[in-house]
Structure formats: C-alpha cells, structure tokens
Image (spheres, grey):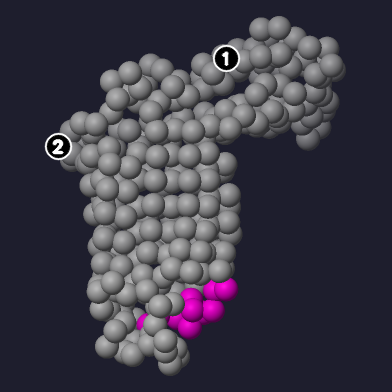
Amino acid sequence: MGYNSQQMLMAKTKDKTLVQPIYLPDTLSEKDIIKDGKLLEWLRSFKDIQKMIANKVDITPIYQAIFPDALAMAQEHDFLLQLCENLESSSWPADKKWNKSKGHCSWAGLTFKAYRSSGAFTARRVTVINLSRYNLFGNETVGRKGNIPDTIGCLSKLRELNLCYNFITGSIPPSIVKLSELKKVRLEFNHLKGGLPQEMEGLKSLEYLAIDHNKIEGTINELAKLTNLKELYIHENFFSGNVPEAMLNIAGLKKFYFYGNKFASLAADSRVKKERVNSQNYDWRDVE
C-alpha cells in the first residue's frame, strides 16, 4: 500500500495519544476493505499499536476512527451474503451471480455510489438493491430461511429497495426503520407476514412504499408517520382496524390503495362510504 504524507491521522484512546504518525493508504482494494484482516494487518504494523495489543488495550476505536467506511462496507457485504444465503434463485445472471469468493461490487442487482472518507480511500456504498422478479425463495431443507435479514439496517446509504415479485417470507425487518435515506421500497407480490415495524418515522425520506399482495396484518397506524409519502400501496393484505385520519392528511400523498384488507372503517373522511373501504380498484383521492 502506498502512503500520502498529507493524509495523516492521529488516533487517540482514553488515556494516551499515539506517538508514531499513522499515514493512511492512498488506495485500498475492495478485498482489503471487505476483509478486515488486511486492514488490521496494516494497522498492527505500527510499533505503538503493537505495544497497545501487548498491553491488551482494545484497538477497535482506533480502527473505527481510521476506517469508518471500511467497516460499513464490510457490514454491507455481510448483509448481502446473508440475504444470498437465505434465498435461492434460478434467475441469477451467470456472470454476476452472488459469490462469496468475489467482492459484492461485481454482483447483479446492485448500484453503488462512491464516498471518500477521511482521505483514506473511496468506499463504494450500496444505494440501490433491485432484485425484482429474480424468483427468490427459501428452502428450509438446506438452511435457506427465505427472509430478509434484519441486519438490513446497516445499509445507511440505501435509497431504493426493490424485491418485488418474488417468494420472500418472514416479516419486514424491524431495522429497516434506520434507513433515513431510503426513498423507495417495493416488496409487493411476496409472502411477507407479521405486522409493520415500529418507529417508522425513521424512514424520513420515504416517498414510495408498495407492500401490496402479501399477508401482512395488524393496524397501519405506523404508516401515518411517513409524512413524505407520495405513493402508498398496501392493498390485498390482512390489515385491520381503522385507516387513520392522519393518513389522509399527508399533503403529498397522491396515490393510496388499500382495498382487499379487513378495515373496519375509514376514519373521519366524509367523502368515502364505509362499504367502499375494502372494494376493488380503490384510490381514495379519486372519490368525492
């Protein structure tokens, strides 16, 4: 690895500052970033670090300070591997099949954006996952759970998630609410069950949500917290209770389909007749 004398970082611990300057590498390969061992090997080459290790001082804070995006990329890689291990598919492109032996930047269905961190290297972070119609399904007999791993919350730069028209099971992972940059989610036409995640206000950038044609149940009160929604498709599920009035007061919401559920009533909206709440092909904004 080459070193740039202009890219120096002095790492600190609670009780000492490293005496020896740490010069950050000019470039790091994707394999270096994903495989922590390469970075740790480089970091451990410094005498001060070696002394700290000998004294059983935790060097994790130093590692995190120098390589924040390296850790993020490693976490993203782990999530994608887990997603791949949970699901089978007969539709992977042969030349871009998700493979443990290759860096995830070469995998099909992924889009990346470069982020430069601390002058150390340019990290390629996942911004789009598009595996629509990949015929993804689980197979318990070989340990494939068929669900979306809850570690999806580590994809902090993700802006679009499209897994529609597959055979994905389980529930919507709770940690998805950590993805504050997520703008579009398409999970329609799967076999998702359970209720909606809590604290959905964390999805503060979300504009498009399609979870129709699943088996999701419970109330939809959490959806009222998605104040930037423009399009919402939750039809053909098992939702119950009332449609909150707050849902109808989201200023930018132009399309809201919720027929084919088990709603008791539509809260306080005189434009809609109760018997039409669960009717087919129903967009509430078209009703006077």
The earlier-in-sequence mark between 2 and 1 is 1
Measuring 74% from the left and 17% from the top, which residue is drawn there? 24
Magenta-highlighted residues: 242-251
> Residue 54: x percent and y percent?
67, 16
Measuring 74% from the left and 28% from the top, which residue is drawn there? 118
Identify the secondary structure beneath mark 1.
loop
Q: Which residue is mark 1?
A: 29
| Nearer to me, 48 or 274 | 274
Q: Is residue 65 left or right of residue 281?
A: right
Of discs 2 and 1, which sits in the foreground? 1
Q: Please name the amino acid that badge 1 sits on.
A: Ser
> Residue 115: x percent and y percent?
65, 31
Reply yes or no: does residue 222 show up in magenta.
no
Which quadrant of the view contains residue 17? top right
82 above or below 40?
Answer: below
Dot 1, how many residues are within 10 Å of its Cα: few (below 14), some (14-19), or many (20+)? some
Identify the secondary structure beneath mark 2.
helix
Q: Is residue 116 left or right of residue 136?
A: right
Measuring 41% from the left and 18% from the top, which residue is drawn there? 102
Q: Which mark is residue 141?
A: 2
Farthest residue to the left: give it: 141
Dot 2, how many residues are within 10 Å of its Cα: few (below 14), some (14-19), or many (20+)? few
Quadrant in the picture for the C terminus: bottom left
Q: Is residue 95 left or right of residue 285?
A: left
Q: Which mark is residue 213?
A: none
Which quadrant of the view contains residue 286? bottom left
Q: CA distance from mark 2 to mark 1?
A: 37 Å
Please say whether residue 145 is visible from this viewpoint.
no
Quadrant in the picture for the N terminus: top right
Q: Please name the amino acid that badge 2 sits on.
A: Thr
> Residue 148: x percent and y percent?
35, 45
